Amino acid sequence: MTALPIMVVVLCVLAIAYRYYSAFIAAKICVLDDTRLTAAVRLNDGQNYVPTNKWVLFGHHFAAISGAGPLIGPVLAAQYGYLPGLLWLVVGVVLAGAVQDFVVLVASTRRDGKSIVEIVKAEIGPWAGVAAGVCVLFVLIIALAGLGIVVVNALSESSWGAFTIAMTIPIALLMGFYSHRWRVGKLGEATVFGVIALLAAVAAGRFIPHSFLEPYFTLSKNEVTFAIALYGFVASVLPVWLLLCPRDYLSSFMKIGTIGLLVLGVLIVNPEMKIPALTQYIHGGGPIIPGKVFPFVFITIMCGAISGFHALVSSGTTPKMVSKEKDCRTIGYGAMLIEGLVGVVALIAVSNIAPGDYFAINVSPQKFESLKVFGYHIEELPVLEQQVEEKVQGRVGGAVSLAIGMAKIFSAVPGLKHLMAYWYHFAIMFEALFILTTIDTGTRIARFILQEFFGKVYAPLARTNWMAGTIFTSLLTVLGWSYFIYTGSISTIWPMFGVANQLMAVIALCAGTTILLNSSKRKYFWVTFLPMVFVIITTVSGAYELMVTQFLPWSHSSNPSEALRGVVDLSLTVMMLICLVVILSDAGWRALRRSSQESSRIPGVVTR
């Protein structure tokens, strides 16, 4: 099987979904109306509420929602074969993920850009609002841990990779000073400098190994963990224009450009799908994700199909910049379809690796030895390691295998055959750059939430410009997600990240369903209700299996650190499930009460 037919079919499905299904939602459910003034127009303050060009806002929204999730999730789920992940990515993004983003964006735009927590509080109830707030904070912490551990596994013991990523920080700082202090408003000049400097950092990184600088950039996993924790803390404390904004801006260019090139590369090269459609691990016992294909493929691949994290963006900065209501269709539904395409391309790239090599990269050498009895043997890996000039066996986490797959596709393009090492390290920088962007943005968001929460106890903490409060809450946030990285692994953190993220998606879909039931469009409530029910089934099933098969046994371990990890993971998962029950119960009770009140007003209907 080759990838070209898959890519063509996927592109056609996404195009049809946007043309017809999103048009149906826009016209019949949301009833978008450009004569209705948006929050950006009514509350225009030149800072947070700013009417923005549709395509500029599309780029911002896509850069914000499309982190490492759609890249890493499909790679890890490839242990089941490419077919389960492919089906969930395509069907899930069309019927669930894009619907959630679209509906939440419209709802927030019509409610002065309020967050999903405030929407839940207003539409469902105060207790549901509190539960949603707790869930948002937990999702942020575990999401940052899930993404951070990918960076740790990709950059540890790699001086070339660590140097390249380290250089992105001074590049971003220089861009910030250049466009805000030295040459105010000259963003184009800063952009040219930033892009050229990033490519130069990749090229210069080749000379780090075997040089006097190698010891300074060859870091262990714990050292990389400390480095990204320090970066997340500093980025959260520094002014937003100095580091955060320049990195986000660079990320949007890199992300859209690289994915476009990868799609084009797949169409030109037509790579072979070496990983089979299904493997024996669909029944469980997989070396990467131990659970069965149901429900674990749905919580392993989350961001490319549906992601609760997106609800934070669709009810965060984006609704405050929508200039016309009809733009929500392109921005909300369209951007999520592109993220689904990112997931498909990542799945195709990693499926171009031989199964034995794929497992050799994504599991420890000791575990890979046990896979040889099932017929998995190293095929091209020694040659690939020589070509990319890195030791890649045992680099668990998905990032390295994806970089290998991307590099194979790019180097197969005519004229680019001898650039395998540069393509590999470019791909590593591409992945790590976006992950670190998510880490610094997520840490800042979590810091804001903590300041709002603690501000009710001690008022000064609510002031985001109070440096002591900023340092305190940033430190708490960083300690939270770095703890999970330090004590966990990709096989334990990623499923937990998936559970938390998908439960947040349930909350967002529940809010959307409640909004429809409260409106005149209640007959269309199934558009959000059916995907909500499906995600509840898959996510709660996954959470139950994680608690029973992993967290409970850990909590009874004789190893104190493992026992503590089990207790913490179990407690947090139970807390998330309790919050979900509170929200669903509150929403269901209010829906039943509303139905009863309406029935009592119908002649001939008697209610007790």
Image (cartoon, rainbow, N blue to C red):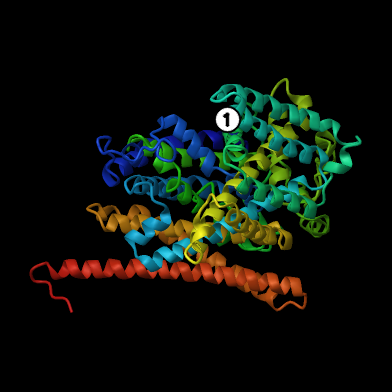
Name the residue nearer the viewer: 571 or 113. Answer: 113
Q: Residue at coordinates 57% horizontally, 43% vertically from top-left?
A: 343
Q: Is residue 226 visible?
A: yes
Q: Quadrant of the C terminus?
A: bottom left
Q: Residue at x 33, y 55 (%)?
A: 526
- Total numbered labels placed on residues in the image: 1
Question: Which element carries disc 1, helix, strand or loop?
Answer: helix
- Residue 193 image offset from top left, x and y in percent: 66, 24
Q: Nearer the viewer, residue 271 or 171?
A: 171
Between 98 and 237, the one nearer to me in the picture: 237
Residue 74 appears anywhere in the view: no
Q: Is residue 21 above or below residue 546?
A: above
> Where in the figure is residue 138, as x and y percent of width and height?
55, 61
Instruction: Classify residue 364 as left or right of residue 296.
Output: right
Q: Quadrant of the N terminus?
A: top right
Circle 1 sits on which residue? 180
Dot 1 surroundings within 10 Å: few (below 14), some, or many (20 or more)?
A: some
- 268 w.r.t. 63: above or below: above
Residue type pointed to by label 1 = His
- Asked if residue 419 lies left or right of residue 413, the reply is right
Does residue 486 appear left or right of residue 26 in this picture? Answer: right
Residue 364 in the image: x percent, y percent? 79, 56
Return the residue found at the far left: 603
Which of the 4 image quarters holds residue 295?
A: bottom right
- Give the percent coordinates (x, y) of residue 253: 58, 30
